[in-house]
Amino acid sequence: MSYNIYMLDKKLTDTQQIKRANLLNKSDFFNNIDIIAFNELFDNDSSQIITDGLTKKGFSYFTPVLGRQIIGWDSTEGNWSDSIPEDGGVLIMSKYPIEYKAQYIFSSGCGADAMSQKGFIHAKIRKDNVVFNIIATHTQADDNSCSISGLTPEEIRNQQFAEIRNYIIDKKIPSNEMVVITGDLNVNKGSLEFKRMIELLNVSEPDSYAGADFSWDPNINTLASKSFPDLNGQLLDYILVDKDHLQPPYWHNQVLDMESPRITLSGTIENYYAYDYSDHFPVTAFVYADEKTPTKSFRVNNSPYNAVSLQHVDTKQYVLADPNNADGWLKVGEPATSSEGEFKIDNWIPKNATCLHDGDYVRLSRTDKFKDYYWNWNVTGYYYTKYGNASDYLRVHRIVPTTECITNDESVYLYDHSLLGNDKYLLPYNSGIASEDMPIQSNGLFTIKMPPMIYSDWSYKLRYQP
């Protein structure tokens, strides 16, 4: 497994590193993994939690963090410097003995990466009489400030790929050993740079990309969306096999788009929630699939919350937008058109919800010609739709909460409050939508109507032992 876990130093940014590290230790998706290469494990406390926790799960062998120290390595090569303030953030953990471990620091970096000892780890691991040479790295990230250096991020990445290739050649690794290059390579699959990277590293593409399309996706990942809300998903993380050494009969890469338990993050005024262990998804690699290999996505692929209707439980009428007025009042009745009673519901970040949970902060927006008009309220307490401005504290809940996603035909209630006010639940009132003091009563219940939740089928991408 290769996993960029976004553990930046807590002094730079608070993304609940300690909470996420503990949740990772409690998760079960490491159970069937033999070797893990972590990226962005910069935070010292988080790295200690990860190594302590996974050691108890059988990952008894691990390297130090790249660039953090010279002690503990069999060899340190490249451009080591005591004056660089941050380490390289790469760590390898294994269930099998590590027979040799070396660190190599790249000769150059630009932008923020110039402040880190980026490079790669070479770990020699023996399993079932086969030696695996794991080259774990995290190459130069795209950074606008790189222009100061006179080189583009792509040019620096190419230099780094050449350093990896030259290292492998210089070490004269026996051809009957496997050489695996893995990590967040910061190169998007399908780009021209990707083709050049494959050539520079002398690796083969996987025979099958058998999981989610992207390992970094702001459209569905809260932590990625928080930093880059307008970018599209990219496949940046790989586990690749060197062509000049032992070859597997078949090679899968599988990105796992799993969700985490709820994580509370600090917002401008109130906290908000995320359901991601990291801003990246992990990628696994294997020869053949087995009964433990995931055969479908963990997240829905059809954006079911983008076409939601709310039917009042007592009256059976629907919440409607005013079809003739962008800023019109919400009302209840029978929709004259399909879009009149249809809304998109999301939890602010990311912009496309894949699973709504009880208590999530949400925005509801119109899906008709008045796009980006959101539910909001005015001083009278009645709700209307307003361009680009959603009610800040609107939340959704079921009467009996569960850990599962809110789905079609479930009864929910919406509740809201002003900046300094108490929560009030929404209900039909005088043909409009207003709010009433909690606790929730039956007149505030709505049945949510939405498409079925569809998951991507990965089974056809998997090959099993002949």
Image: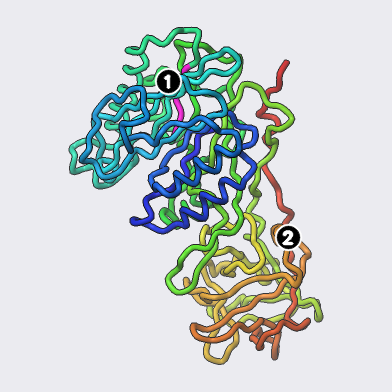
Q: Which of 6 and 41 is in front in this view?
A: 41
Return the residue at label 1. 100
- Looking at the rendered structure, the kind of residue marked 2 is Thr
Query: Which quadrant holds residue 269?
Result: bottom left
Q: Is residue 221 above or below residue 167?
A: below
Q: In this view, does 462 lie above or below 439?
A: above
Which label was assigned to residue 123?
A: none
Q: What element carries label 2?
A: loop
Q: Earlier in the sequence, mark 1 or mark 2?
A: 1
- Does the magenta-highlighted stretch encompass residue 84? no
- Looking at the rendered structure, the kind of residue marked 1 is Tyr
Q: What element carries label 1?
A: strand
**Could you tell me which quadrant the N terminus lies in?**
top right
Query: Image check: 45 left or right of 21?
Result: left
Q: Nearer the viewer, residue 63 or 360?
A: 63
Return the residue at label 2. 407
